[in-house]
Image (tube, rainbow, N blue to C red):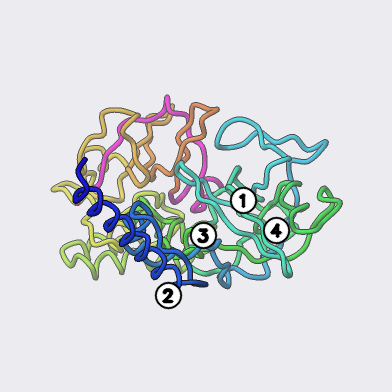
Amino acid sequence: MDASTLLALVLVRDGLLAWVLVHYLLNRGSTPPPSPAIITSTSVSPGPVPSPVLPPVAKTPRFTDITATSFGGPGDANSSAYGGMVDPNVPGVALPYHFTKPTPNVRVFLGDKHVDCAVVDVGPWNINDPYWQTGSRPQAESGTDVSGRHTNLAGIDLTPAAWVSLGYPLPNSAKTKVSWDFIDYLDGKTQTPSVAGIPPWLATMRGLIGIKAGGDNPVIMDMPAFIGATFPDMKDYSSGYKHDSTAWCGLSAAFCMAKAGIRPPFGATDTDKFLWAYAWSSWGTLVASDDDIRPGDVIVWTWADGSHHVTFYDHRVETDDNFWCCGGNQQGHTVSVEPIAMSNRHVIRRPPQ
């Protein structure tokens, strides 16, 4: 290397050393600049930090001061209407209505405590008293259920685990007034989780549960006039119903259909009209398979003496061979829900839409 090249290298070296010294003196005490790798990784803003997901706020329930009792504890083993056994170690409730699966979940309130429960059975007392659908009080609060049994006024049953969650150390003897509502409603997901899939004519029939014939019950005797007013061509025929001692299963079915704006059977001959149970056998459309049956389908039954009965399908219980049906002129000449052996059915028809 000649002298001129060596001198140039020394000058470059000394210049770099001088720049480093000046940079150090000017930036002494400040934070060293990040490496290029760090600059690259932080050059894009990470955006706002998401808020934590909070648990749902328990709103004010709609069903208040409902007498609650206990079921399913030691010495009170319960088989569920939905299949299997009621588990006392899991918070659960029974409500007096048979829901279509999957059953809804409810939140029960007592003082400053609440517990979320699955609906695990049907009861207490009644099996078809959906008092929450109309905002009415539990029918059992009348002191007797629809079968005439003396009640303890309860409108909801709680498992021992539910009672413990509400602060009761002795759930088997627990009885007090609680409030409750459907969790989906309280969490703002839906307004009416309890009535999904229930057609209006079945809802009307359920609202009549407990109505009993005798002494020309005005509720029954007003049905013909309503049908005639809704379908004027049926007015004269309807007015021929004079006393509730006359079979009225077809009348109550026709009334519920009229309330829904659906024409009941009204054929050319007398026996093809709605007061005759058999007239419903060719009305609507055929439901060919039990697997396709839906709440509100019309079932015509044949009895051993050759007579017929018409009612609405309500639900099944997995452990028996019955259709549970809601209709008029049933047990004790009342509107009721009762099991009828599937072997007695004549035909299942679906109302025209």
Marks 1 and 2 in Cβ contact (< 8 Å):
no
- Hey, what amino acid is under mark 3? Ile
Marks 1 and 3 in Cβ contact (< 8 Å):
no
* Residue at screen point 71% across, 64% down: 113
- Hey, what amino acid is under mark 1? Cys
The disc, 4 or 3, on the residue closer to the chain's N-terminal end is: 4
Marks 4 and 3 in Cβ contact (< 8 Å):
no
Q: Which residue is mark 3?
A: 211
**Above or below, 216 relative to 75:** below
- Disc 3 residue crowd, few under 14, some 14–19, many 20+, Cα 10 Å: some
97 with respect to 22 (left or right) = right
Task: Using the numbered discs, state the Cα–Cα distance from disc 4 to disc 3 in whole angstroms.
Answer: 21 Å
Task: Using the numbered discs, state the Cα–Cα distance from disc 4 to disc 2 in whole angstroms.
Answer: 84 Å
The disc, 4 or 2, on the residue closer to the chain's N-terminal end is: 2
The disc, 1 or 3, on the residue closer to the chain's N-terminal end is: 1
Marks 2 and 3 in Cβ contact (< 8 Å):
no
Task: Using the numbered discs, state the Cα–Cα distance from disc 1 to disc 2 in whole angstroms.
Answer: 70 Å
- Hey, what amino acid is under mark 4? Ala
Q: Which residue is mark 2?
A: 26
- Please give the range of residues in magenta: 327-351
237 with respect to 251 (left or right) = left
The total of numbered circles placed on residues is 4
